[in-house]
Image: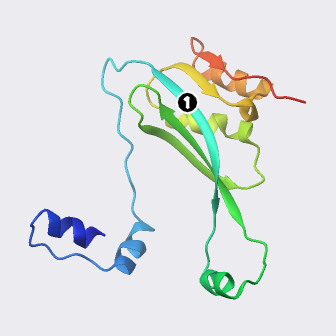
């Protein structure tokens, strides 16, 4: 894909093989952008989604129809409602409670938070406390968990 983009841009650049990119990505440190001075408060939208893990024998199981239990992970994402930019992300095991990830997600947001909005899976007392401790002025918009 990168080779296609380079070709479309009409650039004469060498493109590394996908295995080289994958190998280097394991050790790549990506710096988070620091908030600009006077940055506006963020309206944080939080949700999670499941990601299926694919292994080397995955295509074989698909082809021959063997039924095995597939493992998956959960990705928790915090998005700035104003820009649509992902400002926080946590990858966890599938059985980790969503509310337990509120603190780690909030710690990744450098700007002040005006509001924290999430679904009922994040609606525990601990979630409200974690937001209040880090951002006392933030509004917490999380429906209570249904019983």
Horizontal and vertical percent position of residue 62: 66, 81
Please, is residue 98 above or below residue 20 in the view?
above
Horizontal and vertical percent position of residue 137: 57, 11
Please, is residue 78 above or below residue 38 in the view?
below
Depth check, front residue: 58 or 122: 58
Report the side of 3 relative to 113 (left or right): left
Horizontal and vertical percent position of residue 36: 30, 26
Corner quadrant of residue 126: top right
Report the side of 14 relative to 134 (left or right): left
Q: Residue furthest top?
A: 137
Question: Which image quadrant: the N terminus?
Answer: bottom left
Question: Which image quadrant: the C terminus?
Answer: top right
**Residue located at (78% from left, 79% from top):** 67
Depth check, front residue: 117 or 93: 117
Q: Residues within 10 Å of mark 1 (few under 14, many from 20)?
A: many
**Residue located at (57% from left, 15% from top):** 138
Horizontal and vertical percent position of residue 29: 40, 57
Report the side of 109 relative to 48 (left or right): left
Q: How many marks?
A: 1
**Residue located at (40% from left, 67% from top):** 25
Q: Secondary structure at mark 1?
A: strand
Colour option used = rainbow
The residue identified by callout 1 is: 45
């Amino acid at each position: 894909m990168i080779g296609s983009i380079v070709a479309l841009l009409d650039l004469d650049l060498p493109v590394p093989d996908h295995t080289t990119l994958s190998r280097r990505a394991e050790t790549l440190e990506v710096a988070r952008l620091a908030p600009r001075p006077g940055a506006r408060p963020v309206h944080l939208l939080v949700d999670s989604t499941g990601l299926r893990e694919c292994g080397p024998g995955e295509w074989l199981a698909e082809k021959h129809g063997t039924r095995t239990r597939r493992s998956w992970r959960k990705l928790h994402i915090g998005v700035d409602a104003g820009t649509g930019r992902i400002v926080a992300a946590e990858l966890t095991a599938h059985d980790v409670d969503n509310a337990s990830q509120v603190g780690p997600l909030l710690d990744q947001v450098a700007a002040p938070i005006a509001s924290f909005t999430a679904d009922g899976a994040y609606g525990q007392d601990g979630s409200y406390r974690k937001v209040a401790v880090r951002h006392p002025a933030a509004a917490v918009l999380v429906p209570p968990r249904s019983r």
